[in-house]
Image: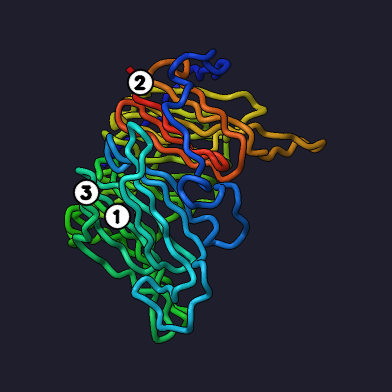
């Protein structure tokens, strides 16, 4: 369980991007359409399947890029696979050597149009979600375990969300059973051993939204009308997370990070990292013309996706998806790296020792560890 206390602090304005230097120059760049057989990452719409894409470090030496694609030929009518798909969609995964960008392996698995992702665990093992199925793969790309995520039957609907703890040791499955009869929905969280997908325990919860997983706790939004969050122990006990700015009633989010740390974004333009004792390890803020869209952390680094925000004549702001990925050493006021992000659908991931991979439009760029 974690306890987070409110602190008074002076937030830091983000300075201009670093001028040149090796940290802002990619070690290599790939064209995802020409070199990897994928669509541009900004080529998506309201159809869910077009948004199932991402990038993830499987280890310090391997990088996975993935995307759901339509089958090249319209399949004949066939029974649905265990993924829930009927052949119309495939999850295409390309694994690259981090040092050179060379392709090591690729997978193409049937999926449905709703859910598909790649999630690293430990020792270069990784999970692949294809619709209603969760697979565990070895570093040699052998399938080690399978867990079905049924979609329901007899008038009931089941929904599943998957998270991996920061250490990669545990998998958390949020399972929601929706009764068509109108009875109250039932929710539980299953905690699995990431090495074999076997059930370790069930965490009782009555509500779960905008959640993330630590190694021994969850973070979830509460049922309050404000953007209030709480930590949830493995026994199902809720403990409110006190906000840096309690007067900010919107654009608030918390995210579990490695080592029991928590990242907090408030009002869309302030961020900080807090440890389990409530100590502030890092804080920064962006200009009011900008917005922090997401944060990631690990191995002593923090990365944040920052958008420029336009304001209309009534003072309402919205992001125009022109911005950058800012990267900090925890505790340093100045970013050690800033990578331009020009298009919608940007995906990024932090690796060991500050390595960074960014997919922006048709470009996949790898930035080496920071010494």
| Disc 1, SS | strand
The residue where tag 1 is placed is 127
Q: Secondary structure at mark 3?
A: loop
Depth-wise, is mark 3 or mark 1 nearer the camera?
Answer: 3
Q: How far across and how far down the image is residue 186, in percent? A: 37, 70
Q: Is residue 265 above or below residue 369?
A: below
Q: Earlier in the sequence, mark 1 or mark 2?
A: 1
Q: Going from the N terminus, do you reach mark 3 or mark 1 first?
A: 1
Disc number placed over residue 370 in the picture, else none: 2
- In the rendering, at what x and y percent does residue 255 appear? 40, 40
* Separation (CA) of disc 3 from disc 1: 11 Å
Looking at the image, do the residues carrying marks 3 and 2 touch, with CB atoms under 8 Å apart?
A: no
Look at the image and tell me whether residue 229 can be seen.
Answer: yes
Residue 211 is left or right of residue 14, and the answer is left
- Residue at 47% x, 67% y is 89
Disc 1 vs disc 2: Cβ atoms closer than 8 Å? Answer: no
Seen at 29% across and 36% down, the residue is 258
Q: Nearer the viewer, residue 203 or 27?
A: 27
What residue is shown with label 3? 139
Which sits in the foreground, 39 or 340? 39
Label 2 residue SS: loop
Q: Position of residue 69 (x, y in %)?
A: 50, 60
Disc with the residue nearer the chain's start (3 vs 2) = 3
Measure the alpha-carbon separation of dots 3 and 2.
25 Å
């Amino acid at each position: 369980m974690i306890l987070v206390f409110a602190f008074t602090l002076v937030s830091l304005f983000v300075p201009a991007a670093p001028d040149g230097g090796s940290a802002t120059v990619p070690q290599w760049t790939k064209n995802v359409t020409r070199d990897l057989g994928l669509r541009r990452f900004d080529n998506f719409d309201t159809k869910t399947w077009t948004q199932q894409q991402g990038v993830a470090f499987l280890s310090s030496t391997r990088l996975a890029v993935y995307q759901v694609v339509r089958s090249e030929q319209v399949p004949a009518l066939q029974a649905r696979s265990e993924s829930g798909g009927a052949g119309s969609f495939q999850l295409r995964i390309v694994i690259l050597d981090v040092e050179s960008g060379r392709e090591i392996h690729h997978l193409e698995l049937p999926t449905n149009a709703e859910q598909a992702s790649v999630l690293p665990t430990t020792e270069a093992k990784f999970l692949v979600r294809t619709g209603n199925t969760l697979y565990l793969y070895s570093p040699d790309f052998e399938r080690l375990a399978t867990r079905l995520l049924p979609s329901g039957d007899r008038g009931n609907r089941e929904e599943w969300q998957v998270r991996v703890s920061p250490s990669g040791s545990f998998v958390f499955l949020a399972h929601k059973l929706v009764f068509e009869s109108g009875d109250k929905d039932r929710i539980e969280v299953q905690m699995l051993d990431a090495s074999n997908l076997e059930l370790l325990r069930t965490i009782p919860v009555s509500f779960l939204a905008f959640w993330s997983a630590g190694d021994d706790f969850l973070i979830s939004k509460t049922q309050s009308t404000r953007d209030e969050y709480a930590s949830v122990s493995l026994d199902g006990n809720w403990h409110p997370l006190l906000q840096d700015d309690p007067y900010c009633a919107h654009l608030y989010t918390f995210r579990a990070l490695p080592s029991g740390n928590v990242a907090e974004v408030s009002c869309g333009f302030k961020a900080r990292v807090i440890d389990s004792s409530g100590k502030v390890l890092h804080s920064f803020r962006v200009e009011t013309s900008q917005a922090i869209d997401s944060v990631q952390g690990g191995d002593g680094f923090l990365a944040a996706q920052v958008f420029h925000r336009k304001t209309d004549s009534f003072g309402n702001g919205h992001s125009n998806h022109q911005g950058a990925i800012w990267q900090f050493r925890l505790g340093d006021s100045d970013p050690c790296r800033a990578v331009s992000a020009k298009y919608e659908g940007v995906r990024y991931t932090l690796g060991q020792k500050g390595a960074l991979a960014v997919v922006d439009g048709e470009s996949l760029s790898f930035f080496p560890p920071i010494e």
